[in-house]
Amino acid sequence: FVANVSHEIKTPITAIKGFVETLKDGAAEKPEDAERFLSIIQKHVERLEAIVEDLLSLSRIEKEAERKEILLETHGIREILAGAAQVCDVKASAKDLGLEIACPVTLRARINPRLLEQALVNLLDNAIKYSEPGQTVTLEGSEQKEEVLIRVRDKGCGIERRHLDRLFERFYRVDQARSRKLGGTGLGLAIVKHIMQAHHGRVSVESKLGSGSTFTLHLPKGERQA
């Protein structure tokens, strides 16, 4: 894990260092070059910031779960779905994507609202990144005998079966170059997994290359969540 973190951080630092040296060697005196190089430096700084924020978030969730400090309360699910959709609305609109919610107002579960919304935002963010303009991403809430299910369904590029078992590993990427280009840190799905473990639940995925993906959050009902 330390080796992976070091690699992820070293890449933007190396780029930043290189472009700073180029600017010091005279590129700063050429306005067009200076602006382009500073934009690249800013992009890598933002990437570093995102990695650090996700690492801190993952560490905090693990620590709070270990100390049993994550409080669960009975809460309406549709409200959480609406909150996550609102957070992602600007990104979706910029890409001409629709966000739809299909969830009974009466659906409730024992959750930590802040963490569950974070998990959904992470899943929505991925769905938006890998969907084509004009498509729709759907958030669905339903219940079975022993579980409350929340699904984030997209019609994007999909994922090959060989990757599915490793998707929730830290820093695992299906397409490293594309993920970095789209701003992914490689930690978003690992955070979702740990949030669901804190809820005594789990996350699963179904996907087919070229046909989209469905990520499902499984929240236990009743005694299993005690």
Image: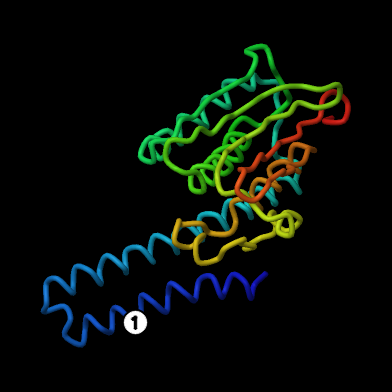
Asked which quadrant contains residue 56, the reply is bottom right
| Residue receiving disc 1 | 18
Looking at the image, residue 206 sits to the left or right of residue 25; the answer is right
The correct choice, above or below, for 6 with respect to 76 in the image is below
Q: How many marks?
A: 1
For the residue pair 196 and 154, the one nearer the viewer reads as 154
Which quadrant is the C terminus positioned in? top right
Asked which quadrant contains residue 121, the reply is top right
Looking at the image, residue 170 sits to the left or right of residue 177; the answer is right
**At label 1, which amino acid type do we have?**
Gly
**Residue at image x 58%, y 26%?**
80
Asked which secondary structure carries label 1, the reply is: helix
**Residue at image x 76%, y 31%?**
219
Which residue is most to the right?
223
Q: Position of residue 164 (x, y in %)?
A: 72, 54
Q: Position of residue 194 (x, y in %)?
A: 70, 48
Q: Position of residue 41 (x, y in %)?
A: 32, 69
**Residue at image x 87%, y 30%?**
224
Which quadrant is the N terminus positioned in? bottom right
The correct choice, above or below, for 180 with respect to 149 in the image is below
Which residue is most to the top?
106
Badge 1, how many Cα within 10 Å: few under 14, some, many 20+? some
Q: Position of residue 48 (x, y in %)?
A: 45, 64
For the residue pair 34 and 115, the one nearer the viewer reads as 34
The correct choice, above or below, for 95 with respect to 190 in the image is above
Q: How is the image coloured?
A: rainbow
For the residue pair 219 and 123, the one nearer the viewer reads as 123
